[in-house]
């Protein structure tokens, strides 16, 4: 079908397509019709075959039943002539059996048993005897005596010759109607006239008729080797036996038939005997005729389809000549030479409507092309003179880039077009993250507007403000328009202003406002009690200013800041609160560590020697340590505690370290450092 479609698209005219389509439709209609009819005929033929097979099997079962009844009637007639008053006289009964010529020819063996099951007389092809046998244990004997009716036994082994037989019995009654004995006859399964005609092969090697008992054992088969075996072991009978067993092994004259594979199997019960006649025959003889008819029908249908296609081709040839003219005129629509109003065919119906529609479309296209050329010239001018970088992307590739963006990125004209959009990102990870953020914005129905890090052709990076939106919001993947502005300078200015707002310009430490913000932030956290704050007030700094001037004092403040910064970790904060006051926020720090750090800072400040003329200037520092806890819930409480600790250090003689709230600290006298640490 794909090859046919490709052929029609490349070479097929409308006439050829219509003809082939007509042929296919006719062929499909014929095939569907023939298929439906054949399916219906096959279903009915199969049902007829099933019914016919079942009817034949029922007939065979009735024949078998009639033969059994005939033998039973013969037994009854013979038993009525038996001298029942001499049933204990073996010689008399043997003599009587010798006279039963008709019954002896119908049955393989005759026997008379008394009421106790003892064999009174027995006659076979060798003559009559009175063997010392007792058959009272045989189910057929007990049923005949107890129920007083004729019985057909199950297949069993003859006690005299160990061969499979079936026994037909008839109760023997005296003049009072009492059962005084049993008369029976046997049928040999290996050689008997009762079943052989029913199971004889009709010349069909595949067909088979068998007789089974109620348990499925073979009583009659055209091959004597199968007798007394399970009928399910015969592959020609297996499915039928399995179906019968699934039904519960009913022995009913009505029987059943089924289609099993390529065979028809039917079974019916034999009246007055727990036997089943089973017939298995192939169905090819019925279906082969049906298949041959189907093939002929398909051939005829194919010829009809071809003839219909030829007629359709001739008709469409005359009807579609204007369409060919329209095709030729449509090809000239692109030459730019033929005037728009010339060469159109005049036709009626759909072809005429199509011709007029194409004519009108051509005129509208010409007008739209002129408008597009004007719009494109304006867009080109806008792209060339725009101060911003402008680009169009599709499927993550740059399809149109203006000169401003090329110059911004260091590319020559047309060099960026066709490049993947990832060429603008410094790394693959940055490109992936940027694509994720862009997609999130577009899915939310928002344009993308963000400052992102971009890379030039020479590898240098800059900050660009990237703004983009889909050309068609209903199809974000179709095309996207982008503008790019270099905001590196503006960003640097913002960062500088931000830094100045949070840092001291002289020492480059965090200023008071930023320190208080960080302290407040720390107080709000659950782990605030694991932090300490140091507050530092320089001693004798005013003397430095008064002696050497403010410039030298500024140098001293810068050196103090450097010494303080050198004693802390990157997670800690050192701040200048103003004038000669400093503060340090130590995270994850206990009192003992805070005392040690404060002492190191005090020593570092004490060791400062700032040269000035022929002398060295120095200062000291008073430290107040505050352990953050729930007792100091806010900034004002911490600042008050810091002032108190620094005041204690000042009163102790300056250049001291004091811990707020330490009961061992004397209020006025200096305390040695080793005592503070303990």
Image (cartoon, rainbow, N blue to C red):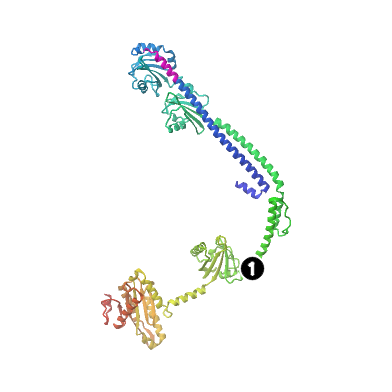
In the rendered image of this protein, does residue 480 appear above or below residue 23?
below
The outermost residue toward the front is 176
| Residue 98 in view, yes or no | yes
Give the x, y percent position of residue 190: 44, 21
Task: Check the image and report above or below for 178 versus 214.
Answer: above
In magenta segment, residue 76: yes
Q: Where does the image place residue 537, in percent across and percent down from the top left?
A: 35, 81
Q: Classify the position of the C terminus by image quarter.
A: bottom left
549 vs 312, left or right, is left
Main secondary structure of the magenta stretch: helix
Q: Position of residue 44 (x, y in %)?
A: 55, 33
Is residue 90 covered in magenta? Answer: no
Image position of 374 (left or right of 268)? right
**Residue 21 screen position, x and y as percent:** 64, 45
Element on which disc 1 rests = helix
Question: Is 260 in front, or is 48?
Answer: 48
Nearer to us in this view, 589 or 65: 65
Count how many numbered circles sit on residues in the image: 1
Q: Is residue 545 above or below residue 138?
A: below
Q: Residue at x 73, y 52 (%)?
A: 346
Residue located at (43% from left, 76% from top): 502
- Left-right relation of 257 to 530: right
- Answer yes or no: is residue 510 visible: no
Q: Which quadrant of the figure has residue 624? A: bottom left
Within 10 Å of the Cα at label 1, are there few (<14), some (14-19), or many (20+) other Cα atoms?
few
Where is 485 relative to 550, above or below?
above
Identify the residue at image location x=42%, y=77%. Answer: 503
Which residue matches tag 1? 378
Residue 231, quarter of the rendered image = top left
For the record, the magenta segment spans: 69-83
Q: Residue 132's quadrant in the figure?
A: top left
């Amino acid at each position: 079908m794909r090859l046919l479609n490709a052929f029609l698209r490349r070479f097929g005219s409308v006439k050829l397509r219509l003809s082939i389509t007509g042929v296919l439709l006719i062929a499909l209609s014929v095939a569907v019709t023939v298929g439906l009819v054949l399916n219906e005929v096959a279903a009915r033929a199969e049902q007829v075959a099933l019914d016919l097979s079942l009817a034949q099997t029922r007939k065979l079962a009735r024949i078998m039943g009639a033969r059994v009844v005939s033998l039973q009637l013969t037994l009854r007639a013979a038993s009525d002539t038996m001298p029942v008053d001499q049933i204990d006289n073996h010689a008399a009964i043997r003599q009587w059996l010798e006279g039963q010529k008709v019954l002896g020819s119908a049955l393989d063996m005759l026997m008379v048993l008394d009421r106790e099951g003892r064999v009174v007389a027995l006659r076979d092809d060798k003559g009559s005897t009175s063997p010392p046998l007792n058959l009272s244990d045989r189910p057929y004997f007990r049923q005949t005596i107890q129920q007083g009716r004729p019985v057909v036994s199950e297949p069993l082994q003859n006690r005299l010759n160990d061969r499979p037989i079936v026994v037909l019995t008839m109760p023997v009654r005296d003049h009072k109607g009492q059962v005084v004995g049993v008369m029976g006859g046997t049928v040999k399964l290996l050689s008997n006239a009762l079943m052989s005609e029913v199971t004889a092969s009709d010349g069909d090697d595949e067909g088979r008729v068998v007789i089974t008992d109620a348990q499925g054992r073979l009583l009659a088969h055209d091959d004597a080797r199968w007798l007394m075996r399970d009928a399910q072991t015969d592959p020609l009978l297996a499915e039928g036996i399995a179906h019968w067993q699934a039904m519960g092994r009913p022995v009913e004259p009505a029987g059943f038939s089924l289609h099993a594979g390529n065979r028809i199997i039917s079974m019916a019960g034999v009246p007055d005997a727990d036997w089943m006649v089973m017939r298995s025959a192939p169905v090819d003889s019925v279906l082969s005729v049906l298949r041959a008819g189907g093939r002929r029908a398909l051939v005829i249908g194919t010829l009809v389809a071809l003839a219909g296609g030829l007629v359709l081709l001739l008709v469409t040839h005359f009807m579609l000549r204007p369409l060919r003219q329209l095709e030729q005129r449509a090809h000239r629509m692109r030459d730019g030479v033929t005037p728009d109003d010339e060469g159109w065919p005049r036709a009626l119906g759909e072809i005429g409507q199509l011709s007029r529609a194409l004519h009108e479309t051509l005129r509208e296209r010409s007008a739209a092309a002129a408008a597009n050329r004007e719009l494109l010239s304006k867009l080109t001018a806008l792209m060339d003179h725009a101060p911003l970088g402008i680009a169009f992307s599709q499927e993550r590739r740059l399809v149109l880039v203006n000169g401003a963006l090329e110059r911004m990125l260091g590319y020559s004209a047309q060099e960026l077009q066709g490049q993947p959009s990832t060429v603008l990102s410094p790394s693959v990870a940055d490109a992936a993250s940027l694509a994720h953020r862009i997609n999130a914005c577009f899915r939310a129905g928002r344009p993308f507007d963000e400052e992102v890090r971009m890379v030039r052709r020479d590898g240098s990076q800059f900050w660009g403000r990237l703004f983009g939106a889909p050309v068609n919001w209903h199809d974000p993947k179709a095309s996207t328009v982008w503008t790019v502005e270099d905001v590196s300078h503006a960003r640097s200015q913002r960062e500088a202003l931000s830094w100045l707002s949070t840092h001291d310009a002289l020492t480059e430490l965090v200023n008071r406002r930023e320190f208080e913000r960080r302290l407040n932030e720390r107080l709000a956290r659950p782990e605030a009690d694991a932090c300490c704050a140091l507050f530092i007030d320089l001693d004798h700094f005013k003397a430095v200013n008064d002696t050497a001037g403010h410039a030298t004092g500024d140098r001293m403040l810068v050196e103090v800041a450097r010494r303080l910064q050198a004693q802390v970790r990157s997670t800690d904060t050192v701040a200048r609160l103003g004038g000669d006051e400093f503060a340090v926020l130590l995270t994850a720090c206990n009192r003992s560590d805070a005392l040690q750090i404060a002492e190191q800072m005090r020593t570092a400040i004490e060791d400062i020697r700032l040269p000035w003329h022929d002398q060295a200037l120095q200062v000291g520092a008073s430290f107040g340590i505050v352990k953050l806890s729930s007792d100091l819930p806010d900034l004002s409480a911490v600042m008050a505690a810091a002032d108190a600790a620094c005041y204690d250090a000042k009163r102790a003689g300056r250049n001291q370290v004091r811990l707020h709230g330490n009961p061992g600290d004397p209020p006025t006298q200096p305390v040695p450092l080793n005592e503070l640490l303990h």
